[in-house]
Amino acid sequence: MISVVVPVYNEEEVIVATLNDIVAALDGFLEYEIILVNDGSTDASLEKVQAANIKNLSVINHIENLGYGKSLYDGILLAKYNCIAIIDGDGSYPASSIRELYKYYPQYDMIVGARKGKEYTKGLFKKYARYLFKYLAEYASGKKVPDINSGLRIFKKDIIINYHDSLCTGFSFTTTITLIFFLNHYFVKYLPIDYFKRKGESKVKPFKDTLRAGQIILEAILYYNPIKLFLLFATCNAGLGLFLWIINYFFLSSLVLTVTSALLIASFVPIFCLGMLADQLKKIYKLRRNESH
C-alpha cells in the first residue's frame, strides 16, 4: 500500500508521461493511489491530466501558486496510506526507482534516492552550495548525507504529520524533512538513482532559493541541536582570532589586531555557554511538550 504525491506547476510537456511512468512502476502493488497537486498552473497541465484518465489518480487543485512544500504537504494530508512516496512532475526523476526504494520500507523510516550524474553536478553555484549544505547537515547529524534535498523519497506519513509545524512551504521542504529525520534519530536509507535533464523551464531561483535553504538548515540545527551550531560559530571565531594573532605576531605588530584577535579567541567560552543554555532550554521545552500530549 503506497500513496504517491506529485506536485505540479506548469509541466504540460511531461506530466502525463511522468504519471504513466509512475503507474508502470506501481504495477504489482495490491493497493496504491497517485495524488497530483496542481499548484496554480497557468498552462494546460491540469487539462492534460484530466484528459489522460490515469488509474487511481486523485487531483488537488490550488487556484493560486502556494509553493512546492505546501503542495506536497496537502497531498500528504489527503493520502490514505502511511507509506508516502514523493516525486517531482518534471521528468527529472526515474519513477521506476520507487519500487527499488520501497524494498526497504517499513524497516527504514525514510528511503531517499541519492542523485548522480552530470545533471546533478552541473552548475558551479549550486554545486558549491550543495557541498556547504551537505557539510552542515553531516556536522549537525553526525551521519553521512549523500543528497540533502532529493525530490524522490519514501517516508512514513505519521512521522511527517508529527513535525508539521517545522515544515517549509517552499522548495526547501525536502531539505527540512531530511534534517528532521536525521536530527530526531530516525532510520534513513539512501540508494543511488539517475537524475535527468528536466523538461521545460525550471521554477527554482538559484540565488534566492539557496539563501532560503541555508536559512532553513540553520534554523533546523538551532531548533533540534543548538549546541552544535553555537560550537561551530565559537570555533570559527576562535580560529579566525588565532589566524589574526599569528599574522599580527609575525608580520604586523598592530595593537588593534592584538585586541581583535584576543576578543575573538576569548569569545569561544561565552558563545559555547550560550549553546549549552540553548540546548537545556530545548530539552525543557521538549519535556513539557511531551507532558502536554
Image (cartoon, rainbow, N blue to C red):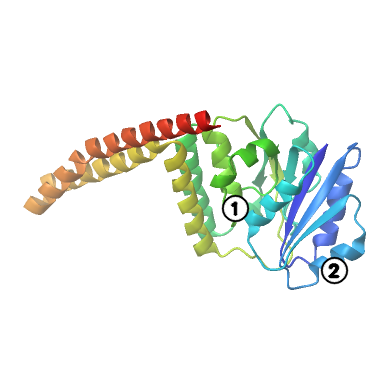
Relative image position of residue 23 (x, y in whole percent): 87, 48
Picture quadrant where residue 106 is located: top right
Query: Residue extending furthest front?
Result: 292
Residue 270, placed above or below residue 291: below
Residue 265, placed above or below residue 7: above
The answer to whether 288 appears left or right of 227 in the picture is right
Residue 114, placed above or below residue 121: above
Q: Which mark is residue 27?
A: none
Q: Nearer the viewer, residue 54 or 238?
A: 54
The answer to whether 26 appears left or right of 135 in the picture is right
Between the C-alphas of marks 1 and 2, the distance is 34 Å
Relative image position of residue 246 (x, y in whole percent): 17, 43
Q: Nearer the viewer, residue 1 or 141?
A: 1
Q: Nearer the viewer, residue 194 or 232?
A: 232
The answer to whether 226 appears left or right of 155 in the picture is left
Picture quadrant where residue 159 is located: top right
Task: Say which element carries label 2.
Answer: helix
Q: Which mark is residue 121?
A: 1
Q: Which mark is residue 47?
A: 2
Task: Say which element carries label 1.
Answer: helix
Residue shown at 78% from the left, 31% from the top: 103
- Amino acid type for the residue under numbered disc 1: Thr
Residue 30, placed above or below residue 199: above
Residue shown at 70% from the left, 51% from the top: 195
Asked if residue 148 shows in the view, the reply is no
The answer to whether 2 appears left or right of 144 in the picture is right
Mark 2 or mark 1, which is nearer the start of the sequence?
2
Relative image position of residue 15 (x, y in whole percent): 80, 61
- Amino acid type for the residue under numbered disc 2: Glu
Q: Residues within 10 Å of mark 1 (few under 14, many from 20)?
A: some
Query: Residue extending furthest top?
Result: 107
Residue shown at 66% from the left, 66% from the top: 65
